[in-house]
Amino acid sequence: MELTALFLALLFATLRLATPLIFAAMGGFMSERSGVVNVALEGFMLSGAFVGAVVGHQFASAWMGWAAALLIGLCVGALYALFVIELKADQIISGMALNLLVMGLIPFITKILYNSTGSTPALLVEDRFRVEPLVMALLLVGVLTFWLYKTRSGLWLLFAGEHPQALLASGVSVRKVRWAAVCASGAFAAWGGASLSLFLASSYSPLMTGGRGFMALAALIFGKWKPVPAFLACLLFAFADAMQIRLQGVRIGEVEIPVQFVQILPYLVTIIALAGFIGKSRSPKALGQEGF
């Protein structure tokens, strides 16, 4: 019974910790499948985490924070789309610039709102999410999988990232498809950030994503740009994260494992996955191509 309880606790912890990764990975999936490289997931997540926490606290409602995160995600996604699609800026540089912009802007706004560059005020326990973001994340994977292969607009997304010339020849605007995909990418990734501040925690804390945007991108690559395999990769990384939490304070004989070594476990797993330890991924053929 004790072993079963431990297994169930680890399973639930893995699913909880996977929630922000799943949202961000599905956001990255939308953008990269359309042909737009997206290293801005970290910035999208931070903006969603911050705005979700601020609005959620203001209205004492996690759902209001969730809706606000969706809106800010759409706005930041549109800003990124403006630069990389309309102005044809370098997609890698633009993504990193957006990450740095959000990282610098949030402490400035926090100082104005709360006279502090640290955390936002915490939501009450009863105002936080219980399990809703996890359920929504799981549903999102199923919906995107069905939509991608069974609907006309899903096929448009695939062709925008694989054969944009064929999509143009059929009379569909590649530019519009990519705009919609990047905006959706911002919204989904912002929900990933909001799940941190409204579900796993009760407030926003500085840089609370902790590189999860890049881990989500790694999960997407590891999952070969497909929703279900990317979801499974998120579970793998989240399991490593759950394990490092469980292993903190564990002793081997008389020696306690240094907490710094334990904390690098999720990132070590990410590096091994990206290094191609299990198979190799082929990116969408038109990923990063401009001129459409």
Image: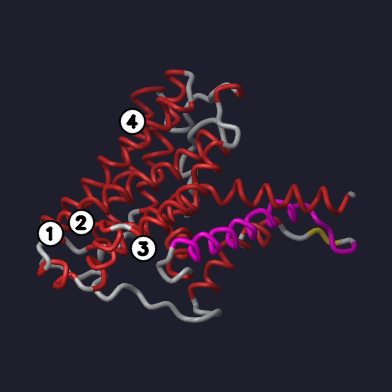
Indicate the quadrant where residue 56 lies: top left
Q: Earlier in the sequence, mark 3 or mark 4?
A: 4
Name the image quarter holding the C terminus.
bottom left
The residue wearing badge 4 is 109
* 3 and 1 marks in contact (CB < 8 Å): no
Magenta run includes residue 168: no
Marks 3 and 1, how far apart in space?
Answer: 19 Å
Q: Earlier in the sequence, mark 3 or mark 2?
A: 3
Query: In this rendering, which labeled residue sits more in front, label 3 or label 4?
Result: 3
Query: In this rendering, which labeled residue sits more in front, label 3 or label 2?
Result: 3
Image: magenta residue range? 227-253
Marks 3 and 4, how far apart in space?
Answer: 42 Å
Q: Residues within 10 Å of mark 4 (few under 14, many from 20)?
A: some
The residue wearing badge 2 is 177
Q: Residues within 10 Å of mark 3 (few under 14, many from 20)?
A: some
Q: Where 282 falls versus 207 (above or below)? A: below
Q: Nearer the viewer, residue 272 or 157?
A: 157
Three-letter amino acid code at the position of disc 4: Ile
The label number, if any, that marks residue 173 in the structure image: 1
Counting from the top left corner in percent of width and height, residue 151 is at 31, 57
Marks 1 and 4, how far apart in space?
Answer: 38 Å
Marks 3 and 2, how far apart in space?
Answer: 16 Å
Counting from the top left corner in percent of width and height, residue 69 is at 38, 35
Indicate the quadrant where residue 258 lies: bottom right
The residue wearing badge 3 is 149
The label number, if any, that marks residue 104 in the structure image: none
Residue 87 in the figure: left or right of residue 254 = left
Q: Residues within 10 Å of mark 2 (few under 14, many from 20)?
A: many
Q: Residue at x 60, y 33 (%)?
A: 130
Q: Earlier in the sequence, mark 3 or mark 1?
A: 3
Three-letter amino acid code at the position of disc 3: Tyr
Query: In this rendering, which labeled residue sits more in front, label 3 or label 1?
Result: 3
